[in-house]
Amino acid sequence: MTVVGDPTRGPAAGAVLPADKAALGQLFDKHGPFDEVVDLTALSRAARPLGSDLLCGCDRALDLVQALEKAQWRPRPRLRLVARAGWMSTEPEAIDPMSAPLWGLGRVIAREHPELNVRLIDLDGAGSMPAFIAHCLHDDGEAEVAFRDGRRFAARIEPMPPSDRRPTPLSRRKTYLITGGTGALGLAVARLFVDQGARHLVLVGRRVENDEAQRQVAKMEETGASVRLVRADIGDDGNVRRLIEDLRAGDPPLGGIVHCAGVVDDGLLSGQSKDRFTRVMAAKARSAWRLHEHTRDLELDFFVLFSSMSAVLGTRGQGSYAAANAFLDGLAHLRRAQGLPAVSINWGGWRDIGMAARMTDAARERLDANGVALIPPQAGLLILESLLTSAAPRSACFRSTGRDTWPPTGARRRPSSSESSPTPPEPARPGRRSGILARLRPFTGCARRPLKTGPSCLPASCANAWPASWA
């Protein structure tokens, strides 16, 4: 990891930082303050398997942010986080899911520490180094960029066009696995599948004895469905291996997977620890990776990953959760590049069920501050059905409150050209809630002037994207 400072300060302007957190603080105390910090740690970690580095470099970024916060330099240094193949720039390019978590965490750092002027930079190799250096020397305000063959790309969110694909019919002769299946969200997915004709479900969860799960399963079985509850922590590799081996040996064959499992351990980065990050990453990211490893030779109809808008918005207090969900987004792209089915859905919160039902008042305030409202369950299930075999490996589904906090940093509306800011459509009416089904993709080139922010940057067509009956 390299620190770049003011060259007038002599040798301390550029220094290789130690790996030890305590030594990092000592270096800052001795040689600081710095004008700019560039973290290249993830470049050396990207090739490692997930089992050997579960935190995917996020532990180093966490150490760095905590050390910078403790240093209390004025003015604050600029922070640049650099990864390799962690963000798509040219389809159908494969993403390294081991690099993707740094992007999710980086967006949270940008939210919690705007004074650090965070920039997220993705490289493809040494060939892009000159362009990368030029970007560092001439910052034009673009928060998230990727370099491919010396060309620069910027992240954009754009509305997803209507699909002419029909939802894939669920087979009565296949088994469907739902992780986190005994939670409220998993049970809702299970009911949808039964309603759509599925007759063989396996619901996996850490707690299968709860009364609500038993009641819901009994109702589904009254329709003729066979619903099997399996108690397992799928963050454990042995549990996943045994589960898939059991499904391979059974009949009917496994036809699809919906990965809903996950835990949250919210808290500002200043109070986070590697142990807390590891717990969240194991439940969400490592379990998804093991499911991928143990099923990639099977002919699945779908492989759906329930990701979160926290990986896109960088929600304050959700650094570990954003990192884990960004991994799911990267895994979906990796599977597509390997010719395997996958879609990762960056969900906003679902109303009355799932983690949103257990939200604290503070968490609801953070959600509202990001301009996001909760999704009615009926709407979420209809959208899930339409996305099971989506052509896009990654989509975002959320509700906008119409507040002036949109778009989030680094995820702006696609401009009309690479030379100028777009002419925005008419602003949304105050207080109006609209639904957005968005495709997340790159934009070739970068606007030379800062893009206008606020709800008026959303295309006018988005205003009617959410049927009134779903409100």
Image: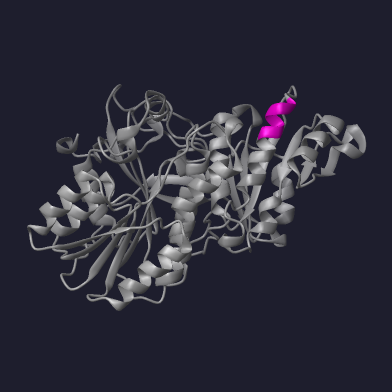
Q: Give 214 or 306, whichever is nearer the viewer.
A: 214
70 in the magenta segment: yes
Give the magenta range.
Answer: 66-71
Please tell me which residue is depicted at 58% across the width and 58% down the height of the picture.
Answer: 85
Write down the quadrant of residue 224 in the picture: bottom left
Please tell me which residue is depicted at 22% across the width and 71% down the height of the picture.
Answer: 174
Please tell me which residue is depicted at 30% across the width and 41% down the height of the picture.
Answer: 354
In the image, residue 443 above or below residue 296: above
Give the tally of numbered discs: 0
Quadrant the C terminus occupies: top left
Left or right of 67? Residue 145 is: left
Write down the quadrant of residue 355 in the picture: top left
Residue 104 in the image: x percent, y percent? 52, 45
Residue 398 in the image: x percent, y percent? 33, 40
Q: Give 198 or 397, whichever is nearer the viewer.
A: 198
Left or right of 222? Residue 30 is: right
Q: Give 134 or 60, whichever is nearer the viewer.
A: 60
